Image (cartoon, helix red, strand yellow):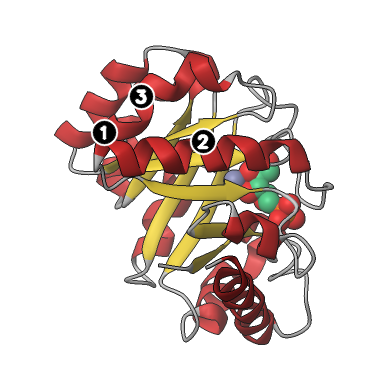
Amino acid sequence: MIEIAPSILSADFAYLGDAIQTVEPETSWIHVDVMDGHFVPNLTIGAPVVASLRRHTKSHLDCHLMITDPWDYLADFAKAGADSVSFHFEVGRTLELIRMAHDLGMKAGMAVNPDAKFDDYSTYIAKLDLLLIMSVFPGFAGQAFIPDVLESLRRAKEIIEESGSNTILQIDGGISLETIGASCAAGAQVFVAGSAVFGQPDPSGAIRELKRAANLALEGSQ
Ligand code: DX5
Ligand code: ZN
């Protein structure tokens, strides 16, 4: 499985419906970056925008919650029509959040910052639907990929294979034609891309190129 999840953070917020329509022929995932100005030094959007997007797309709305108190908002995201929520490992209460997301009918994702210690979060991997490994420090689009996280991807893939779980491995931050290959070879399956998709003049063409680069790397690594 290889999917590009374009991040609407790099789209024109005044034309989100159009942006999603543009990429829909190439992907069935849309990544929604939710920031609260506390967990990260930036403010973006929340559940009301997800509810609006839901009315315009059947794609998987993949909500990345860069917020300090996700437990207070999961019900709002479920009601808005989110398909998955990825809360951050750093905020704690992981098992409770996984259970809450499932009880609300959403896939449960956990995001980990680039400096999270693998052994601190590895016990949760098999319990998740989605593990989102951050390859930049969250807060802004357009930052440089941190290659150190490739090792975490490789180790996470081993755990998923050993446990037989269906956890999807996602990578987020600095994904481009230059970095997608190494991430794919290390085990990532869903690639969040902001600048490399909506920052480009032809977003759907950009997705096709990214998928081609990922597939090439996959063939090379087998
Ligand atoms: C960063 C966000 C990312 C970001 C990716 O805090 O979580 O999803 O939008 O943007 P690029 O692909 O430009 O690094
Ligand atoms: Zn994100």
> Looking at the image, which residue is at 69% across and 71% down?
197
Left or right, residue 190 beside residue 205: left
Question: Of tags 2 and 1, which is closer to the observer?
Answer: 2
Mark 1 and mark 3: span between their CA atoms? 14 Å
Residue 142 visible to an observer of this rendering: yes
All told, the count of numbered labels is 3
Left or right, residue 76 beside residue 52: left
12 above or below 45?
Answer: below
Mark 3 and mark 2: span between their CA atoms? 13 Å
> Looking at the image, which residue is at 66% across and 54% down?
9
Question: Of tags 3 and 2, which is closer to the observer?
Answer: 2
Q: Is mark 2 within 8 Å of ligand 2?
A: no
Identity, as a three-letter code, of the amino acid under mark 1: Ala
Q: Which residue is mark 2?
A: 155
Quarter-of-image position of residue 45: top right
Coordinates of residue 38 in the picture (x, y in percent): 65, 19
Mark positioned earlier in the residue sequence (1 or 3): 1
Identity, as a three-letter code, of the amino acid under mark 3: Tyr
Q: Nearer the viewer, residue 172 or 14?
A: 172
Q: Which residue is mark 3?
A: 124
Residue 109 visible to an observer of this rendering: no
Give SS at disc 1: helix
Mark 2 and mark 1: span between their CA atoms? 25 Å
Q: Pick the quarter of the image with the N terminus.
A: bottom left
Q: Which residue is mark 1?
A: 101
Coordinates of residue 66 in the picture (x, y in percent): 57, 31
